[in-house]
Image (spheres, coloured by chain):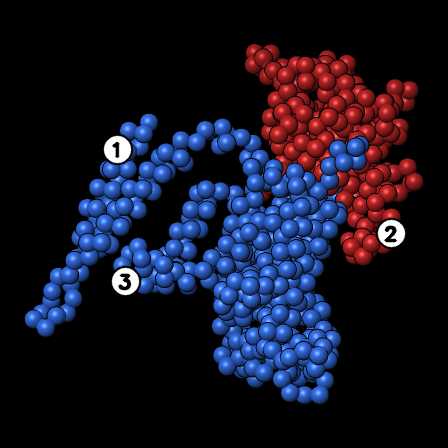
């Protein structure tokens, strides 16, 4: 096939036949899609289409009824996310996420938020606490490295001058970016962003687009994005998956999606007279 | 402004007068010819005067204060700023005071001829320190990890009974039993932690409350093992590195040191013992706070779901919080057992858990210094209320202040919570500051 697309050639994330029902309500119905490294994959769809549910399956907060979620690492290891506990999905399989309603540690400082994200690494460095309590090992130097990584991401997200402030005191737009910085501090292979532009003004969402493009070009990771702001989606994504009522109705490049009649029907509704004629 | 304050104070005192005339002013007493009314005018007058002056004071100085202090950042706190600017010195002063307290009391007593009951003062100081240690232990669970634990006294009991039973049945010394008791309490902390992993807030509080009661009831009913309501007596006293504190004997502390025998030696030794145990709690907790585990505890309090999305094993994190908190409770428990020489389930009732929790909450959740202040205020204040005979000058000879102890205590707690709703020290010190690094 000559027109094979990048995400089909070398997918990092491969979702096959994902199905999840809450009682009688089928939230996700036989969903298949792929996502490639160094690409932004947007999942769009009307409200209640099941986008966040897909994210919750990917990050282990829900267990799907059926289907396979495979994540391929560079070293050839393949992780089946549907079988893993949520904290292992982050620290073994390297999947990080943000939340639709921001979930920062509001009572802790910005820097502390980013250090909590490096918990696994630092915990080992501290000799599971006991070592560091007894003054063994090089915990200090490891902590310094962790702070450097945190500062790198704070500079990328333009928050470095607020490192010692409480996360809850930041303005809304900064909190959104801090959540992304915190997710990036876990050094993920797949970054799942749940409506990162929600509630942002045009200037802030422009900044966000730049940030995501920046991450895409600098890091070797795949970004998965749920977003309602079509200007952001069309501007930055390389690949769009459209879901409605838990089913995939379209999958392709932004240009293909823009012209897909099924997508237009889902978003704008169908003219009833033409429907009847068909 | 002053006029308004005056009218307000007058109205308040009129209400106080109307109420107190009938409720307090008259009393019926048995007299030979039947019931006789006695009048207690001075008491009524003093009550009205207190209300008037108090209301006037509140109007003039308290409620008129600039409102800016209230609208400031909720993490901002006058006390805290003062503390942060001279953090080390205040810590140092507190520590120095704790170490020098016995000496200070001795000197004061000798120089100024106060005739203080030294033993009583040392006992109170020891009691306050015990509660400080318990408060610091519970602070890990409630203040840092945000897991509301109403049954903390169970670990205190486990520590006490562990020491008592190990010492009596196996003849182990205090210094061997101490870590064992801590370990056992930690194991029980994990045992409690497992079933309540999924619970939070009110539900967790109920289950921990039940756990505390279960431990107490088991201790009460397992007669063969724990002595039931009779308790365990004759618990070995601690020795000073093998030198017992006895009047008679070959190798006792006072002979070795070449001192006159005094019962105060043991009391002082116990004081320094609990001081060192409390300091151990303080330093370990403070260090842990700055380690990943401590940050994970605090993150868990802030948002559990975010924690899980960041790869934190919340099960282990909660269990370590329970175990660490329980361990310090257990250490304090064995100290309690060796100090009292006798323990029974009576000492481990729910009210103890409530007092420890009140210390943590009054001090300000998560604040180490707050626990110290709250312990001194609560335990010390509680004792202070036993010596309130000066109130008789105000309210007349037949006023018994000790009857009002609980009432005053409750009032004080309400007042503190109104004055400082988030505890004495409501701000949180960051575990790491970037500015330090770049300085």
Q: Chain of mark 3?
A: B
- Above or below — where is B113 with respect to A146? below
Quadrant of the drawing holding the N terminus of chain A: top right
Percent position (x, y) of residue A218?
86, 25
Observer able to see residue B403: yes
Determine crowd level at label 3: few under 14, some 14-19, many 20+ residues with C-alpha closer than 10 A. Answer: few
Q: Residue at x 32, y 63 (%)?
A: B400
Q: Chain of mark 1?
A: B
Label 2 to label 1, Cα distance in Å? 70 Å
Q: Residue at x 7, y 71 (%)?
A: B33
- Nearer to the camera, B431 or B338: B338
Chain identifier matching the blue colour in the rendered picture = B
Question: Of the residues tagged 2 and 1, which is closer to the observer?
Answer: 1
- Above or below — where is A247 with respect to B134? above
Q: Are marks 3 and 1 in contact (CB under 8 Å)?
A: no
Instruction: Identify the element where label 1 is drawn.
Output: helix
Residue at image mark 3: B397
- Nearer to the camera, B53 or B230: B53
- Nearer to the camera, A272 or A103: A103
Residue at image mark 2: A137
Residue at image mark 1: B7
Q: Colour of chain A?
A: red
Q: Are marks 2 and 3 in contact (CB under 8 Å)?
A: no
Label 3 to label 1, Cα distance in Å? 32 Å
Q: Residue at x 18, y 51 (%)?
A: B21
Instruction: Identify the element where label 2 is drawn.
Output: loop
Percent position (x, y) of residue B242?
73, 79
- Above or below — where is B279 with respect to A242? below
Question: Of the residues tagged 3 and 1, which is closer to the observer?
Answer: 3
Label 2 to label 3, Cα distance in Å? 68 Å
Q: Are marks 2 and 1 in contact (CB under 8 Å)?
A: no
Q: Chain of mark 2?
A: A
């Amino acid at each position: 096939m000559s027109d094979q697309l990048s995400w089909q050639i070398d997918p990092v994330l491969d979702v096959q036949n994902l199905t999840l029902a809450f009682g009688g309500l089928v939230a996700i119905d036989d969903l298949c899609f792929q996502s490639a490294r160094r690409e932004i994959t947007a999942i769009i769809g009307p409200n209640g289409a099941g986008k966040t549910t897909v994210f919750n399956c990917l990050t282990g907060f829900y267990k799907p009824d059926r289907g396979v979620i495979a994540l391929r690492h560079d070293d050839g290891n393949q992780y089946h996310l549907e079988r893993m506990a949520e904290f292992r999905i982050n620290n073994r399989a390297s999947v990080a996420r943000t939340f639709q309603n921001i979930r920062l540690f509001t009572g802790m400082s910005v820097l502390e938020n980013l250090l909590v994200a490096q918990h696994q690494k630092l915990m080992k460095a501290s000799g599971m606490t006991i070592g560091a309590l007894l003054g063994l090992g090089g915990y200090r130097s490891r902590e310094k490295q962790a702070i450097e990584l945190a500062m790198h991401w704070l500079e990328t997200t333009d928050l470095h001058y607020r490192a010692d402030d409480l996360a809850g005191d930041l303005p809304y737009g900064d909190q959104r970016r801090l959540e992304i910085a915190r997710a990036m501090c876990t050094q993920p292979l797949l970054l799942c962003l749940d409506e990162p532009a929600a509630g942002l003004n045009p200037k802030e969402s422009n900044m966000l687009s730049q940030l995501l493009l920046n991450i895409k070009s600098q890091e070797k990771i795949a970004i998965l994005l749920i977003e309602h702001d079509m200007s952001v989606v069309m501007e930055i994504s390389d690949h769009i998956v459209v879901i409605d009522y838990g089913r995939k109705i379209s999958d392709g490049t932004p240009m293909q999606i823009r012209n897909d009649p099924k997508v237009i029907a889902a978003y704008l509704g169908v003219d009833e007279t033409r429907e009847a004629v068909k | 402004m002053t006029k308004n304050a005056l009218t307000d104070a007058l109205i308040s005192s009129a209400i106080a007068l109307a109420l107190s005339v009938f409720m307090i002013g008259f009393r019926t007493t048995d007299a030979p010819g039947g019931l006789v009314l006695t009048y207690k005018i001075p008491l009524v007058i003093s009550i009205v005067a207190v209300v008037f002056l108090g209301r006037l004071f509140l109007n003039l100085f308290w409620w008129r204060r600039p409102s800016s202090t209230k609208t400031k950042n909720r993490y901002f706190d006058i006390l805290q700023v003062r503390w942060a600017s001279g953090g080390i010195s205040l810590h140092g002063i507190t520590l120095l005071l704790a170490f020098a307290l016995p000496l200070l009391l001795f000197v004061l007593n000798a120089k100024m001829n106060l005739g203080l009951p030294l033993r009583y003062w040392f006992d109170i100081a020891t009691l306050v320190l015990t509660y400080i240690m318990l408060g610091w232990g519970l602070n890990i669970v409630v203040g840092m990890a945000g897991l509301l634990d109403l049954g903390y006294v169970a670990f205190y009991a486990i520590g006490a009974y562990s020491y008592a039973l190990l010492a009596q049945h196996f003849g182990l010394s205090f210094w061997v039993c101490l870590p064992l008791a801590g370990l056992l309490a930690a194991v029980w902390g994990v045992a409690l932690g497992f079933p309540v992993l999924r619970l939070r807030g009110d539900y967790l509080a109920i289950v921990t409350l039940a756990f505390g009661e279960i431990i107490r009831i088991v201790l009460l009913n397992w007669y063969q093992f724990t002595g039931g309501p009779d308790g365990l007596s004759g618990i070995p006293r601690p020795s000073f590195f093998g030198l017992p504190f006895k009047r008679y004997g070959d190798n006792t502390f006072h002979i070795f040191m070449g001192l006159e025998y005094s019962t105060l030696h043991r009391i002082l030794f116990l004081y320094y013992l609990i001081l060192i145990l409390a300091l151990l709690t303080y330093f370990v907790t403070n260090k842990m706070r700055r380690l990943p585990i401590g940050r994970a505890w605090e993150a868990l309090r802030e948002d559990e779901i975010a924690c899980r999305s960041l790869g934190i094993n919340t099960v282990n994190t909660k269990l370590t919080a329970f175990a660490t908190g329980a361990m310090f409770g257990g250490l304090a428990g064995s100290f309690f057992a060796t100090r009292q020489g006798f323990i029974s389930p009576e000492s481990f009732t729910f009210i103890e858990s409530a007092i420890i929790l009140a210390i943590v909450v009054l001090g300000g959740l998560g604040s180490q210094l707050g626990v110290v202040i709250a312990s001194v205020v609560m335990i010390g204040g509680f004792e202070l209320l036993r010596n309130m005979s000066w109130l008789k000058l105000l309210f007349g000879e037949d006023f018994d202040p000790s009857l009002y102890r609980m009432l005053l205590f409750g009032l004080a707690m309400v007042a503190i919570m109104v004055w400082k709703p988030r505890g004495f020290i409501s701000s949180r010190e960051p575990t790491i500051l970037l500015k330090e690094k770049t300085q």
